[in-house]
Amino acid sequence: MRPQDLIEKKRDGHELSRQEIALLIRGYTRDEIPDYQMSAWLMAVFLNGMTEAETQALVEEMLYSGEVLTHSDIPKPKVDKHSTGGVGDKTSLVVGPVAAACGVVVPMISGRALAHTGGTLDKLESIPGFRTDLHLTDFRSILKSHGLSFIGQTREIAPADRKLYSLRDLTGTVQSRPLICASIMSKKLAEGIDGLVLDVKVGRGAFMRESADARKLAETLVSVGKRMGKKIVALITDMDQPLGRWVGNAVETREAIEMLQGNMSGDFAELSLDLAAHMLLVGGIASDLESARSLARDAITSGRALDTFRAVIGAQGGDSGVADDPGRMKKAKRVKDVVSESSGFVTAVATDEIGRMIMDWGGGRRRLGDPIDHSVGFELHAKLGEHIETGEPLITAYYNDEHRFDEMQARIRKAFHLGESPVSLQPPIREVLQ
């Protein structure tokens, strides 16, 4: 059967068999099917969806397109955490060290920026010298020594997803639930984990803007994971505004380090502690959520989580001094406030637009292979429900390209909506599914 036959079949809303999905995924991974044909199939999936059987087949084909790791020589629970993508979401840089400090092994295979959302690898690479392109031998060694290692996808692990990940970004098909599910689960199941904590974002800065869509995605992810014999929990979390006070690669890394140093206030800290607590529950380190939260807090207040992060930075070639002095990371040459032209309560934030502005100012990629300016970032002074006066800063911008400032200033002001009354705020965690 020809690829175009399968494109037409999915275009017309029909279900593909496991063999037909295997033909597409294996052919594309071996470079036998060109990008333009796979792009057409991705769009057909985006428009028509996939059945449960199709989604399971897609996950398994992508998973077994490469090596599936095992860590039987490490006698500890192996648990990872994954976010579906948000703006200001740097939780992996906190929950990984916290969980590892509490006795969970965290083999974290992460991604780069996708559309308007940031990527864990790009944040880590804002640390001078930090390498995410480790050989699997080094990955396993660091994991055994420190209980945590961060790497990107290698040629050996889920190579089908490695190719499809960038193609989805370039073809406007990122938001498809079955494609998101297959991408996440193929990578994560290949890590050699016993369990997984999923952070499914919902809101203006998420790929799933509606609660019903986010819940369906969470249910699909949990269902696929359970069928593969893993312990899975999914938290549906708020992304109607950026998480924390900083957006951008180096500045988000600094915010994460400051939390590991003991700053546990605000929505970013609250969500990070809960995600880490659920990792301890999945790993069997704690028996209830309150004791798990207590263990996570103690890992930070005792300094053990920061010690873990410092050791991993050094083991992966980075400047470990950043763990004690985040100012050692590259800084933008220009810093300027963007002030409000009116007063009122912040009633809405165009969170996706804030992510796009970071990308457009050099902090993200328009095309695969584009260089990133890791120093570009925003400090948010106005969060949902907060009051701001005329002339007070909405955002402090950290940037290098001066000629775009006027354009960005106008976009920043347009991204914040002010009203006469405060809005009711969503909790950071809206629902937990398991």
Image (cartoon, rainbow, N blue to C red):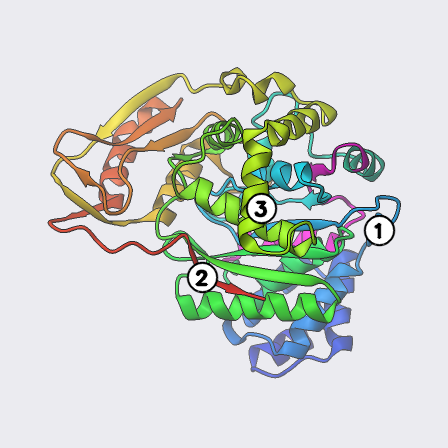
Q: Quadrant of residue 346?
A: top left
Residue 381 found in image quarter:
top left
Q: What stretch is highlighted in magenta?
A: 144-172
Label 2: which secondary element = loop
Graded by Cα atoms within 10 Å as few (under 14), some (14 to 19) or many (20 or more), the crowding at tag 2 reads: many
Residue 314, image x and y in percent?
Answer: 70, 22
Q: Nearer the viewer, mark 2 or mark 3?
A: 3
Secondary element at image label 3: helix
Which residue is at 84% across, 47% downward?
Answer: 71
Q: Callout 1: few (<14), some (14-19), or many (20+) C-alpha neighbours within 10 Å?
A: few
Compare marks 3 and 1 and give the one earlier in the sequence: 1
Question: Residue shown at 53%/76% (left/top)?
Answer: 48
Vertical position of residue 48 compared to residue 176: above or below: below
* Magenta span contains residue 384: no
Q: Name the residue under label 1.
A: 70
Residue 149 on the magenta segment: yes
Q: x, y (%) of residue 380?
A: 32, 35
Disc 3 marks which amino acid? Ala
| Mark 2 residue type | Met
**Residue at the spot x=47%, y=25% of the render?**
375
Q: How far apart are marks 3 and 1 (CA)?
A: 23 Å
- Which residue position is annotated with label 2? 208
Q: Mark 3 points at which residue?
A: 276
Q: Which of marks 2 and 1 is nearer the N terminus?
A: 1
Q: Can residue 41 be seen in this view?
A: no
Quarter of the N terminus within the rendering: bottom right
Q: Quadrant of the C terminus?
A: bottom right
Label 1 near label 2: C-beta < 8 Å? Answer: no
Residue mark closest to the camera, 3 vs 1: 3
